[in-house]
Image (spheres, rainbow, N blue to C red):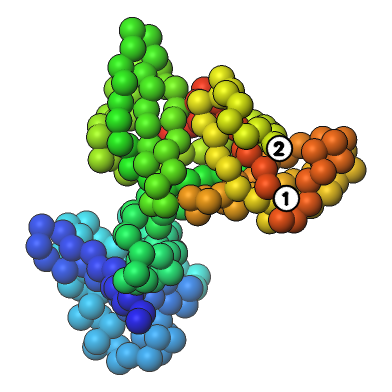
């Protein structure tokens, strides 16, 4: 399955235009002529003029204007408002295309639960980004402890200030993304039933180890289906005997978990 969607502009219910009309405006701007602009996009002069006239009327301010005389013999150009409109539509089209692509990639698998936060896929410097929903909020005098339930059943706890909790409008069942930087993930082996003060404990196995000059990047596949990335020293890799297939526990302090949500 493929998702199809169209981007179109309206003003007070009156059509302003979509990709075809915006392409016409761009062609007129490049060619300096409605005649040549129409030819560039493959329409007749009358079709182009009717479209431009309709856009000028719908916009309430001219998007295209003609000039006469002068050394160049006059011509047609976009007004400043028209130039801004075309530039903005190009930006919106690029964002729209990317979003539809993400929806196609992440939203059409009927065997998986739909998550808008996963679709948005925020780009940050945090190597770990996990989409889930708020399952509990334990309010404190200064900080709140927020529990986030992941699709595979894992629960990630985050400590956020009351001010941040209010600013994000956090509530139970709200979709959020929990983010953790790779250096904030601690690794341990052979913990067994040992108790640790770190609020988040994720048991799994090493999937890969990518060595560097000083540090190594370790990717862990947890039993709950979360992929965790940690940055540790080469000395720690040797001391813990980390290698693909090795059982390991990822530990993350609740204070190192950042939360993001759609406004």
Count of numbered circles on the image: 2
x and y, in percent, of residue 26 in the image = 42, 71
107 over 192 or under it: above or below: below
Q: Secondary structure at mark 1?
A: loop
259 over 195 or under it: above or below: below
Q: Earlier in the sequence, mark 2 or mark 1?
A: 2
Left or right of 251? Residue 14 is left
Q: Which residue reaches farthest right?
A: 213
Q: Nearer the viewer, residue 102 or 18?
A: 102
Q: Which residue is mark 1?
A: 246
Left or right of 133? Residue 15 is left
Residue 189 marker: 2
x and y, in percent, of residue 211 in the image = 84, 49
202 over 94 or under it: above or below: above
Name the image quarter holding residue 79. Answer: bottom left
Mark 2 neighbour class, 10 Å CA radius: few under 14, some 14 to 19, many 20 or more: some
Name the image quarter holding residue 107. Answer: bottom left
Q: Residue at x 40, y 65 (%)?
A: 106
Residue 25 visible in rendering:
no
Q: Residue at x 30, y 92 (%)?
A: 44
x and y, in percent, of residue 20 in the image = 32, 78
Q: Which residue reaches farthest left?
A: 13
Q: Residue at x 28, y 73 (%)?
A: 6
Residue 89 marker: none
Q: Are marks 2 and 1 in contact (CB under 8 Å)?
A: yes
């Amino acid at each position: 399955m493929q998702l199809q969607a169209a981007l179109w502009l309206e003003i007070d219910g009156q059509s302003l235009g979509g990709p075809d009309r915006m392409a016409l405006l761009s062609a007129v701007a490049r060619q300096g002529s409605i005649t040549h602009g129409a030819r560039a996009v493959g329409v007749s002069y009358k079709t182009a003029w009717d479209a431009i006239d309709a856009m000028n009327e719908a916009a309430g301010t001219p998007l295209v204007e003609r000039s006469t005389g002068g050394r160049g013999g006059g011509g047609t150009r976009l007004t400043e408002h028209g130039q801004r409109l075309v530039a903005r539509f190009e930006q919106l089209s690029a964002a729209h295309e990317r979003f539809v692509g993400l929806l196609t990639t992440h939203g059409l698998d009927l065997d998986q639960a739909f998550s808008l936060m996963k679709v948005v896929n925020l780009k940050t410097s945090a190597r770990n980004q996990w989409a889930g929903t708020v399952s509990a909020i334990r309010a404190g005098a200064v900080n709140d402890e927020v529990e986030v339930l992941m699709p595979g059943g894992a629960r990630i706890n985050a400590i956020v200030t009351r001010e941040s909790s209010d600013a994000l409008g956090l509530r139970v069942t709200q979709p959020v993304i929990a983010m953790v930087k790779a250096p904030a993930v601690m690794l341990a082996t052979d913990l067994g039933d040992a108790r640790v003060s770190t609020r988040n404990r994720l048991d799994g196995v090493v999937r890969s180890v990518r060595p560097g000059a000083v540090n190594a990047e370790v990717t862990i596949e947890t039993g709950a289906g979360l992929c965790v990335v940690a940055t540790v020293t080469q000395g720690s890799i040797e001391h813990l005997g980390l290698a693909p297939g090795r059982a390991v526990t990822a530990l993350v302090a609740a204070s190192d978990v950042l939360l993001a949500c759609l406004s």
